[in-house]
């Protein structure tokens, strides 16, 4: 698949996921807002109903009191002589007051006379009813003088609140308080506090709105579980977000793997193409040398025969190195490397590698020194892979040499304490171009290559140091790097020794 196709699919999927998340977020936001509005509207209706019922109780209280007072005026009183007296006071619409006393002998008048008294009371009450507006105004003016805890009893308010909230479908726990105009609390429930978190959970309603402003009181109600109420209505959206998130993560992983796979495929193809070219040269050289051996003149010349033998040996080593590169490439396709562990002397192996590599270093006018000072150098490793590790480090030093100074390579071994046990430290130091600080953290990553600036002849695929890191880890050791740009680099490998 082409990279442009992968990018096209990535953009399409990214836009699709963005649109899907936007729709879900907007839907969730609208649902929360709608639920919050419904809750607020239900609470306001409930508070208004509570205040209305309290006002009705207030009016009923004074009307009953007034009716009782009127009836007491006309309640018959029995005198000592057996007669009945009824006294009353009347006020005409013109404002004239009259006192009226009726006295009658019940025995003489009988039940008919008593009924006339009832009619008289009824007429008086109907007259008072005609003045109802004026009476109510007077009642409201007088009611504000009563203590608020009598007019709005806490138990009664709590009962009304619970009833009205249930009627509006808001069966939720609440805390409330009655405060005056200055905000001072007249009384409150145990769980009420002004500093409750979530100012949108507090609702306020004026008690007895017709009271004078200086005697105003307010009912404050707080709902501690309002957030739970709203969350319950959008709970079903959680699985949708979870599934969307899983799809998004899966999509990102797929895209990343696709790019990695494409990069890996390209690197493998380049590696194979380059390896094919690298194979052709030594094979052609060996083939030419073999043909020269068939010439009798060559066989008679010991110097020529020795030269041909050297060429064949060098080209064979070159082929072996290329084969080992292919082997290194295959190491990354397995989680666990298959190693053939044997006990070897690190000093001897490193000395042989240095001697072999000496010709290559001297070819570039360089010098290699080996200070093998480790007294205990027995290690348990796969000799082939261990050799490749050291060889990779030396080869990198040659590749990334500086042209303005003579190449110098130093190999040092010494005994150290490693993870609480005895170990051997193997360091390879060069005076090459060095590694920048920002690159040092990534040089052991597979396929990562440090920029070489003006060095355009350096070939590689970012596998050498990744292979070194993997093999050192497989052998139970660790590797570190110290480098300064344009000064040099030092790689240090620490491996456990097999003493005793």
Image (cartoon, grey):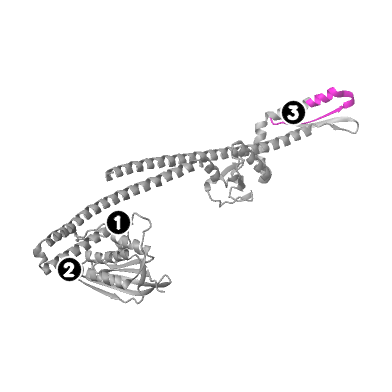
Residue neighbourhood size for the residue with mark 2, other residues' Cα within 10 Å, grouped as few (<14), some (14–19), many (≥20): few
Which residue reaches farthest right? 81
Task: Say whether residue 298 is magenta.
Answer: no
User: How far from the left and from the top, in percent, is residue 65?
Assistant: 73, 37
User: How far from the left and from the top, in percent, is residue 84?
Assistant: 86, 30
In the picture of the structure, the residue carrying the numbered disc 2 is 363
Residue neighbourhood size for the residue with mark 3, other residues' Cα within 10 Å, grouped as few (<14), some (14–19), many (≥20): some
> Of residues 44 and 269, which is closer to you in this image?
269
* Element assignment for label 1: helix
Say whether residue 169 is visible. Answer: yes
In the picture of the structure, the residue carrying the numbered disc 3 is 124
Vertical arrangement, residue 62 with respect to residue 411, above or below: above
Q: Quadrant of the C terminus?
A: bottom left
User: How far from the left and from the top, in percent, is residue 94?
Assistant: 68, 29
| Count of marks, rendered view | 3
User: How far from the left and from the top, in percent, is residue 262?
Assistant: 29, 48
| Nearest to N terminus: mark 1 or mark 3 | 3
In the picture of the structure, the residue carrying the numbered disc 1 is 329
The stretch of residues the image draws in magenta is 92-118
Question: How far separated are the C-alphas under marks 2 and 1?
Answer: 28 Å
Question: How far separated are the C-alphas under marks 2 and 3?
Answer: 135 Å
Q: To which quarter of the image does residue 6 belong?
A: top left
Q: To which quarter of the image does residue 307 belong?
A: bottom left
> Of residues 172 and 257, which is closer to you in this image?
257
């Amino acid at each position: 698949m082409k990279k442009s196709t992968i990018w096209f699919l990535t953009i399409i999927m990214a836009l699709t996921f963005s649109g899907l998340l936007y729709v879900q977020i907007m839907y969730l936001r609208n649902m929360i807002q709608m639920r919050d509005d419904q809750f607020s509207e239900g609470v306001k209706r409930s508070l208004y109903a509570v205040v209305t019922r309290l006002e009705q109780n207030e009016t009923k209280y004074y009307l009953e009191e007034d009716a009782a007072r009127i009836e007491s005026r006309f309640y018959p009183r029995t005198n000592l002589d057996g007669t009945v007296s009824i006294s009353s006071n009347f006020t005409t619409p013109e404002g004239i007051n009259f006192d009226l006393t009726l006295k009658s002998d019940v025995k003489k008048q009988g039940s008919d006379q008593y009924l006339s008294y009832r009619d008289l009371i009824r007429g008086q009450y109907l007259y008072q009813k005609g003045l109802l507006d004026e009476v109510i105004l007077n009642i409201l003016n007088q009611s504000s003088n009563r203590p608020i805890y009598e007019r709005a009893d806490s138990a009664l308010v709590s009962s009304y609140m619970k009833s009205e909230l249930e009627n509006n479908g808001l069966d939720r726990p609440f805390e409330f308080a009655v405060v005056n105009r200055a905000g001072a609390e007249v009384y409150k429930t145990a769980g009420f506090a002004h500093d409750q978190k979530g100012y949108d959970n507090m609702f306020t309603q004026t008690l007895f709105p017709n009271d004078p402003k200086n005697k105003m009181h307010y009912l404050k109600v707080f709902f501690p579980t309002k957030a739970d109420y709203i969350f319950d209505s959008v709970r079903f959206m959680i699985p949708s977000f979870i599934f969307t998130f899983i799809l998004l993560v899966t999509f990102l992983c797929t895209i990343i793997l696709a790019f990695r796979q494409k990069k890996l495929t390209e690197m493998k193809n380049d590696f194979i193409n380059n390896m094919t070219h690298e194979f052709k040269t030594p094979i052609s050289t060996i083939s030419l040398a073999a043909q020269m051996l068939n010439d009798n003149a060559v066989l008679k010349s010991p110097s020529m025969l020795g030269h041909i033998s050297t060429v064949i040996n060098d080209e064979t080593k070159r082929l072996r190195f290329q084969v080992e590169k292919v082997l290194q490439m295959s190491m990354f396709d397995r989680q666990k490397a298959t190693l053939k562990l044997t006990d070897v002397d690190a000093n001897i192996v490193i000395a042989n590698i240095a001697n072999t590599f000496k010709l290559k270093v001297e070819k570039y006018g360089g010098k290699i020194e080996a200070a093998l000072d480790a007294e205990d150098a027995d290690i348990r490793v796969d000799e082939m892979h261990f050799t490749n590790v050291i060889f990779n480090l030396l080869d990198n030093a040659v590749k990334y040499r500086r042209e303005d100074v003579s190449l110098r390579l130093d190999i040092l071994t010494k005994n150290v304490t490693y993870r609480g046990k005895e170990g051997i430290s193997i360091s390879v130091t060069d005076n090459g171009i060095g590694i920048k600080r920002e690159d040092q953290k990534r040089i052991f990553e597979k396929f990562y290559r440090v920029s070489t600036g003006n060095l355009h002849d350096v070939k590689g695929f970012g596998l050498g140091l990744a292979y070194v890191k993997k093999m050192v880890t497989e052998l139970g050791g660790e590797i570190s790097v110290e480098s300064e740009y344009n000064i040099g680099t030092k790689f240090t490998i620490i491996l456990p020794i097999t003493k005793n």
